[in-house]
Image (cartoon, rainbow, N blue to C red):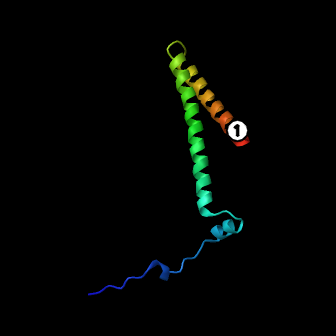
């Protein structure tokens, strides 16, 4: 028994309206994907640097200071470093 197979070119593909609008503005899908991946990677790197600052502060000050104060201060430092680096990245 033989089966009938259809190629993918036989099926019409409709584009979504938001894709058409973005392409009309000159934003192609591949470039948008690359830009999104770039922003995601930069955010991960910046967050990792902030986490490193957090870890160093906790490692250095936790043995000799109040644990709640050290962790709270390190969390604030993590946030401040990450936001500062994000603003520096956006500026350049």
Q: Is residue 35 above or below residue 42?
A: below
Residue at x 57% of width, y 45% of height: 41
Residue 58: x and y, percent?
Answer: 53, 22
Residue 42: x and y, percent?
Answer: 60, 43
Q: In this view, does 51 lie above or below 35?
A: above
Nearest to the observer: residue 65 or residue 12 = 12
Residue at x 52% of width, y 12% of height: 64
Residue 14: x and y, percent?
Answer: 57, 76
Q: Which residue lies furthest to the top in this view?
A: 64
Q: Quadrant of residue 32?
A: bottom right
Q: Is residue 44 above or below residue 60?
A: below
Q: In this view, does 46 lie above or below 62?
A: below
Q: Quadrant of residue 84?
A: top right
Total marks in image: 1
Residue bearing the label numbered 1: 87
Q: Quadrant of residue 65?
A: top right
Q: Split into 4 quadrants, where in the image is the N terminus? A: bottom left
């Amino acid at each position: 028994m033989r089966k009938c197979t259809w190629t993918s070119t036989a099926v019409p593909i409709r584009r979504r309206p938001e894709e058409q609008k973005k392409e009309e503005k000159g934003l192609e899908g591949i470039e948008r994907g690359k830009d999104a991946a770039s922003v995601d990677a930069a955010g991960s790197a910046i967050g990792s640097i902030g986490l490193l600052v957090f870890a160093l502060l906790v490692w250095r000050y936790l043995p000799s200071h109040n644990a709640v104060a050290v962790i709270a201060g390190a969390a604030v430092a993590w946030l401040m470093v990450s936001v500062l680096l994000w603003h520096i990245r956006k500026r350049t």
